[in-house]
Image: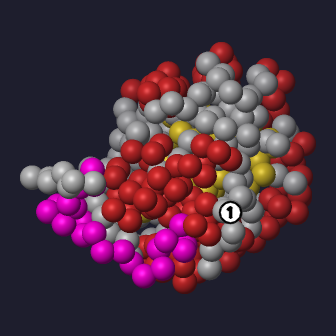
Amino acid sequence: MLTMMFDGSMNTEEWGGGTKSIAGVDDILKKATEFVPLTRDEGLRLMKIPLHSLDCYRMMAAANRMSREQFCSKGENHLHIGLNVEPCPLDCLFCSLTHKAGIFTEKVDYSEEQILSWARYAEKLGCDGINLMTTGTYPFLRLLEIGKLLSQEVSVPLIANTRDINHAEGEALLAAGFVGAYHAVRLGEGRDTPLDRNKRIKTIQVLRDVGLKWMNCVEPVGPEHSAEELIDLMFLARDYGATYSGVMRRINFPGSPMTKFGMITELEMARLVAISRLIMGDVPKAHCTHEPHSASLLAGANLFFPEVGSNPRDGQEDTSTGRGNSVEACQKIHREMNLDPSLPSNCYQ
Ligand code: SF4
């Protein structure tokens, strides 16, 4: 039971949060809300703030205020279109599209008509970006063709989400009509994936060099990830100037080898969304969370990814019939939380 105190606050000790402040939290929150860059040590101190504590809600409130001020209460929606389904030979442990997971045994390349129809749906509903995702071995030239096609047919900015690239490939993405690329150094990169962390970072540098916007998320977060691992990726995002970089949790698909670790809750994700928001300072143009939910919109997030096509968290071939949220559903959550999806995007300024 919660006890309401005379001053209107709640006795959070009764539900495990505690009322004692972590040393220096007031100064860190003040610094962050004045958009002064935090240090790594300050970030690590924020990671010690327990869920449900008063400091946790103060931190979420500070992050919320920063985003609503900086992003002018804009609710962003970037439609994820998974272009293909394939038993991916790269076998990242958290992904449902892997060969090892055995969920998908056939290759599916969505037709141009289908992809165009999804892109037109995004345009019609006023999406702020279209994020074209491929599996790890999808032909790069095919991605360029799809980019060229969509950039002629729809006005929504295109973002690529594909393998590591070099400078020439970065230039080719630009020429095909892409304005940016989503490219995350994943948690456990090189351990839970066969990919090289340094090569991933090199690609981020390529994006910056050629003038593609770099979109990022700290992902896929599970309960086993240490404060240091999470903070490292939050600071990488700030230091390389991510257009956005919030937090996405790992979804354990049925049979996932990560099931033994469990999953974090949406509320735990909101706490991390707040910490990453404080760390990002005045760098980002938006702050993402995935999958779409309300709690993180009170903790500094304003960007959702509705999803169609393939999805590395789903067992359904087309996620619009599975875990994927529609654009309408995402916009509804935004509106319920007093964010306005109809305002212009801040991401491309
Ligand atoms: S995350 Fe990407 S590269 Fe890794 S297995 Fe899944 S589709 Fe392949």
Which residue is drawn at the image coordinates 76% and 22% (left, top)? 154
Inspect this view and state whether residue 1 appears: yes
Inspect this view and state whether residue 95 appears: no
Which residue is drawn at the image coordinates 67% and 77% (left, top)? 198
**Residue 23 colored magenta?**
yes
Q: Is residue 321 above or below residue 5?
A: above
Name the spot of residue 124 as percent of width and height, x first. 65, 16
Rendering quarter of residue 119: top right
Q: Mark 1 points at which residue?
A: 35
Q: Which of 128 and 149 is in front in this view?
A: 128
State left or right for residue 205 relative to residue 40: right
Mark 1 close to ligand 1, CB under 8 Å:
no
Which residue is drawn at the image coordinates 79% and 67% (left, top)? 205
Quarter of the image where the C terminus is located: top right
Name the spot of residue 211 as percent of width and height, x first. 87, 54
Specify the segment rendered in magenta. Answer: 8-29
